[in-house]
């Protein structure tokens, strides 16, 4: 068995700091690097990419709505052509930093509200996929298992990566519990690691309300860098999976 472990990184901005990217890049196998629209800046982006390249961590573009104030967690009714251009802009920025570091962008993952919208918003999913096709159609897209985005990508011949979330609670329909709800964000490293072991081995995870176990077939597991105790969570997930004989390695 094999599973990827990813984290959203490069989300600091100027003097404001988000998470511990340096520590996380010693654990994860893929890094979703912010491209400046929801978080990050050129200095942070360049530093994050360089560190990831040095440690052999695969780099993906963590593209977002242009929403710094809301950290990309607010839905924006962006016109499809504008959204395509926004994604292309972000891909180009990260690609430039990757080239300087001797590496490259290897996949695309929407961030926050854009990620959530991609599960059902056809026009915006289409806009994102058009950007990928224009930039590099060989880049796979990361998304929620069973989402509209992944179905549309597969229909267009774009690679797909289904993703699970270590530190988030699930609803019975397989979507994430909104962050405003109790139980939406998980904190116990041992409990989280146990859930992820069940997910990799059995393809199932318990819902946030404990009422049932749902099918979640994933190729990658995400740990959010802004979750309290996130380094301990990521490290424990890695230890438990590796200890069970599961190879933790990037899907790329």
Image (cartoon, rainbow, N blue to C red):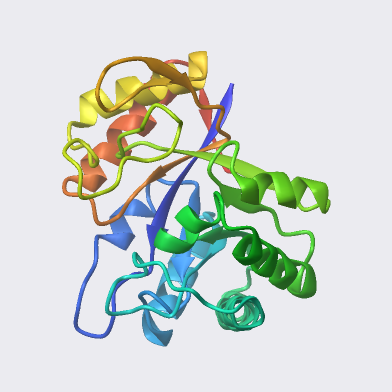
Q: Quadrant of the N terminus?
A: top right
**Which residue: 77% across, 53% down?**
158
- Say which quarter of the image contains residue 74: bottom left
Q: Height in image: 131 above or below 218?
A: below
Residue 191: image x %, image y %?
23, 23
**Which residue: 47% across, 70% down?**
64
**Which residue: 43% across, 46% down?**
28
Residue 245: image x %, image y %?
49, 17
Q: Nearer the viewer, residue 30 or 135?
A: 135
Residue 79 visible in the picture:
yes
Q: Nearer the viewer, residue 16 or 100?
A: 16
Residue 196: image x %, image y %?
39, 26
Q: Height in image: 119 above or below 17?
A: above
Q: Nearer the viewer, residue 173 or 106?
A: 173
Left or right: where 226 falls relative to 125? left
Residue 156: image x %, image y %?
82, 53
Q: Height in image: 38 above or below 41?
A: above
């Amino acid at each position: 068995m094999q599973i990827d472990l990813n984290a959203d990184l490069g989300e600091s901005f100027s003097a404001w700091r988000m998470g511990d990217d340096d520590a996380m890049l010693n654990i994860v196998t893929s890094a979703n690097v912010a491209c400046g629209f929801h978080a990050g800046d050129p200095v942070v982006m360049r530093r994050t990419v360089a560190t990831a390249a040095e440690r052999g961590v695969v780099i993906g573009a963590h593209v977002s709505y242009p929403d710094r104030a809301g950290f990309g967690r607010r839905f924006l009714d962006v016109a499809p052509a504008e959204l395509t251009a926004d994604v292309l802009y972000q891909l180009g920025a990260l690609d430039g930093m990757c080239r300087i570091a001797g590496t490259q962008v290897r996949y695309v993952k929407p961030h926050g509200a854009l990620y959530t919208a991609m599960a059902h918003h056809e026009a915006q999913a289409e806009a994102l996929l058009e950007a990928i096709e224009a930039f590099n159609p060989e880049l796979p897209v990361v998304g929620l298992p069973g989402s509209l985005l992944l179905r549309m990508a597969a229909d267009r011949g774009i690679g797909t990566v289904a993703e699970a979330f270590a530190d988030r609670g699930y609803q019975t329909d397989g979507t994430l519990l909104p962050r405003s709800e109790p139980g939406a964000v998980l904190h116990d490293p041992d409990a989280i690691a146990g859930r992820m072991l069940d997910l990799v081995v059995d393809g199932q995870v318990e819902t946030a309300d404990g009422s049932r176990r749902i099918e979640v077939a994933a190729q990658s597991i995400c740990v959010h860098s802004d979750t309290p105790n996130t380094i301990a969570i990521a490290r424990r997930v890695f230890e438990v999976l590796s200890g069970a004989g599961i190879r933790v390695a990037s899907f790329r």
